[in-house]
């Protein structure tokens, strides 16, 4: 029973990561699907990453227009 439960938990965690938005590779359209991120902010993200790589999802707050509150609302949907 423990092995089955552990397998389910690992599978769930892996599937959640598969659907995360990679902020280093996502296009404007995909970024715009995130809550509170419109095309304008998505463009700023793409422009920022042309000059800087996102090493951790928290780096997204270095982009103008993305503060702590907005980041907190989408951080579970992000990956690097």
Image (tube, helix red, strand yellow):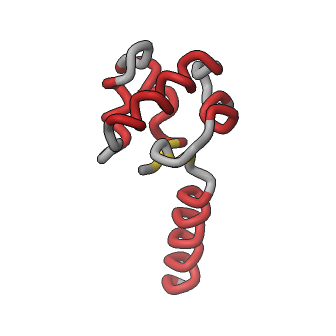
On the image, the x and y values in percent for residue 2 come to 49, 83
| Location of the N terminus (image quadrant) | bottom right
Count of number-bearing discs: 0
Foreground residue, 27 or 18?
27
On the image, the x and y values in percent for residue 42 come to 56, 26
Q: Residue at x 64, y 20 (%)?
A: 39
Foreground residue, 4 or 70?
70
Q: Is residue 50 above or below residue 40?
A: below
Q: Residue at x 56, y 50 (%)?
A: 20
Q: Residue at x 54, y 19 (%)?
A: 41
On the image, the x and y values in percent for residue 67 come to 37, 17
Residue found farthest to the front: 51
Whether residue 54 sits left or right of residue 47 in the image: it is: left
Q: Is residue 72 above or below residue 67?
A: below
Whether residue 54 sits left or right of residue 30 in the image: it is: left
* Residue 33, image quadrant: top right
Q: Is residue 42 above or below residue 16?
A: above
Q: Residue at x 62, y 53 (%)?
A: 19
């Amino acid at each position: 029973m423990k092995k089955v439960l552990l397998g389910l938990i690992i599978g769930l965690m892996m599937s959640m990561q598969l659907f995360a938005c990679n902020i280093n590779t996502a296009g404007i359209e995909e970024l715009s699907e995130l809550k509170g991120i419109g095309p304008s902010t998505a463009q700023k993200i793409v422009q920022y990453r042309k000059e800087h790589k996102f090493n951790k999802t928290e780096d997204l707050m270095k982009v103008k227009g993305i503060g702590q509150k907005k980041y907190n609302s989408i951080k579970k949907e992000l990956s690097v």
